[in-house]
Amino acid sequence: MSQASPQRLPTVLDVLTTLAEQGTAHRLDGLLTDARERGASPRQLHELEQATALAAALIDRGTESQDREATLVSLVDASRDLAEAMADSVQGTLRTATQRARRLLRADLAYLALHEAVEGPLTVVASEGDATALNIGLRITSSSGLGRAALDKGAPFSTSDYLADRSIEHTDEIDQVVRAEGIRAVVAVPFRGPGGVSGALYGAHRQVRRFTPLEIDSLSTLASLAAATIGTARRVESLGARRDELERDCAQAWGIVGTHRRMEAAYDHLLTLVHDGSPLDAIVEVAATALEGALAVRDLGGEQLAAHGELPPYTEETLTQRGFDALAAGEPVPLDDGAWIAPVTGGGDPLGTVLFLPDTPHTGQRGPRPLRVAVRAIALSLLRERSTALAEGRTRDDLFEALLAPESSALPWWQLEEQATRLGITPETPYVVVIARPEGGSLQRAAVWATSYAHRKRGLKSVREKSLALLLPGDDAAAAARAAHKELSPLLGVPVTLGAAGPQTGLPDVARLFADAQRCLTALTELGGVGSVATPQELGFLGVLLADVLSVPSYVEGILGPVLAHDEQRFTEFARTLEVYFASGSSPRRAARVLHIHPNTVARRLDRITELLGDGWQSPERTLEIQLALRLHRTRGTLLGRASRPSGRQGL
């Protein structure tokens, strides 16, 4: 028991016992009261007061940690609910957002207000927990209210007692609703989507209270998740509104009535599968059966996402080249054997390609028209997958940032590991870190790609300055970097430079791998290898060395310039001779055997090199610089893809 016995005064041991039994602050206060009533001395009371104060602080800290964990779990659940509601309707997504906001804050009331223009009025479009019919449709036409302040400033606003707060600009219209609902405490956070702030999300209590920073931050995170999901839900709903047009396309594609009815039923089935969230495999099977042929869906990196039927063994080069042709033309392009490759796009962005081989060859120039209809259904499915990734992306991004800088995380390490496990990132699985830097193009488009790519690969992503960081399951960093490069560079239409490191197990090593990959990226930049891929294993000691070198080309030119110019102009092999000479322990005779020339020829070449570099080139200091410059020159040439120039004639 945590209470002291009647025979003795409460002591520090009783405080520790109460703490071990997970007692409350009220029980700690009872120990102090007990001690005072039993006549404890001032010294005993002072020690007991200090002990109970420390114990109460530990209880508060534990309660705060539990609240943070519960909030994080609630946000993950909210992202799933929003993704599911998105498939139904925009209004259903709005309703889910307010329901989740009310549950997150344990509030009496939650509501969402959106605006049609930046300077336009706010209109309450969804509400949860309201007791009157005055809230839905309320228009906030002036600069009054917390929501308008959140919209104008782009920051959260809260008050413990709305009607009594004179710092808020009040209006009769809003105050009437507040009185009718009995609202006292209110918090409003910006509703920020990809296009900027579009409204405000509110939480309200019918008693006076203050909102904690954790409550305000969690409501802001929920608002960002909901804004991204609602934007996608609107696009999906817009695509669904074109169903009649797509059905007319089906009717025109199949001329006879019997075929039309069959394809109309198949297309209805496709749309039902998409809106029910069926896997892509099921959608492709229905499409291939209806089209009477074999069909496969590939992503932008050439990975096959789903297939049905037997397709010929096309070369990867053929599929990649013709796939880019289809994406550039915006319509199907034919292959030599009667197959077609059609582009899959959504929201103005390329999503992948569809490879289709009909059982009966098609003679048109733009591909079978039914194929276009099936491709639209496949695009809807891929858009849904991307939307799910975006809805969960914020939580996954926060986890990656915490793993990259655990010392600044608000959560202890064991909670980060638990969160990673819930998101499918197990500490026992090998992983690699890839950093990609687009050399131009739209970073926003690259960030959207990274979110979708990390979702498909069951990894994490982070956007830092002008680079994208990916944590991906796998045991080959170079292969992971090349796969990302193959997909991202064509999407952006610009070179992409990538550094990668790994593999590793154990989440504490994420930050170290990130630093290694960043050093590889820096080394590639200094070597002039823009658009290339490198890992620490490929660069060797250069990866560490080049992090501090300012300009590799100028360094090589300053050390070996005359020799390289002589080789270029006169087709000599002085640079090669120097490499072999140093590798042979500076022995002309051994170098001659490696080069398959006479020792006198080596001696004459060294004399000529002395004329080019000066008399002191064989001093220890100059020798080290020359050997380093030779190594840098050879590695840079490899990165740039230059083969050694065959010598036209042997110079001396």
Image (cartoon, helix red, strand yellow):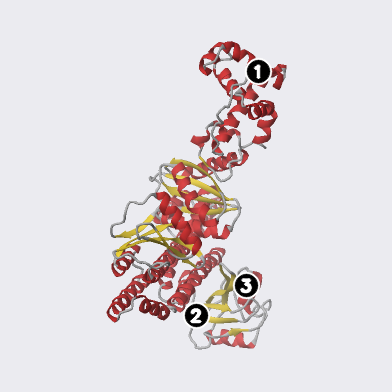
Mark 1 secondary-structure assignment: helix
Mark 2 crowd level (few <14, some 14–19, many ≥20, 10 Å Cα):
many
Label disc, if present, on residue 126 of the rendered structure: 2
Q: Which of marks 1 and 3 is in front?
A: 1
Q: Residue 150 carries which label?
A: 3
Q: 380 or 512, which lies in front?
A: 380
Residue 361 lies, in percent from the top left, at 32, 64
Q: Which amino acid, by three-letter code, is at mark 1?
A: Pro
Q: Where is residue 422 in the image (x, y as percent from the top left)?
A: 40, 56
Q: Is residue 617 left or right of residue 84?
A: right
Left or right side of 394 for 316 = left
Estimate the spatial distance between the alpha carbons at disc 1 and disc 3, rounded to whole Å: 68 Å
| Residue 584, quarter of the rendered image | top right
Compared to residue 368, the image places residue 436 above or below, namely above
- Amino acid type, callout 2: Ala
Disc 1 or 3, which lies upstream in sequence?
3
Residue depth check, mark 1 versus mark 2: number of the one nearer the observer: 1
Residue at 40% of width from left, 46% of height from top?
A: 427
Question: Depth check: 196 or 57 in front?
Answer: 196
Give the Cα distance between marks 3 and 2.
Answer: 18 Å
Q: How far apart are marks 1 and 2 (CA)?
A: 78 Å
Q: Given contact means CB atoms under 8 Å apart, are the residues at marks 1 and 2 in contact?
A: no
- Which x, y percent locates residue 133? 50, 88
Q: Which residue is labeled 1 in the image?
A: 620
Q: Which amino acid does label 3 sit on?
A: Ala
Percent across and percent down for residue 599 are 57, 11
As drawn, 613 above or below 295: above
Above or below, comparing residue 142 to residue 378 in the picture: below
Whichever of labels 1 and 2 marks the residue nearer the N terminus, that label is 2
Q: Earlier in the sequence, mark 3 or mark 2?
A: 2
> Toward the viewer: 113 or 591?
591
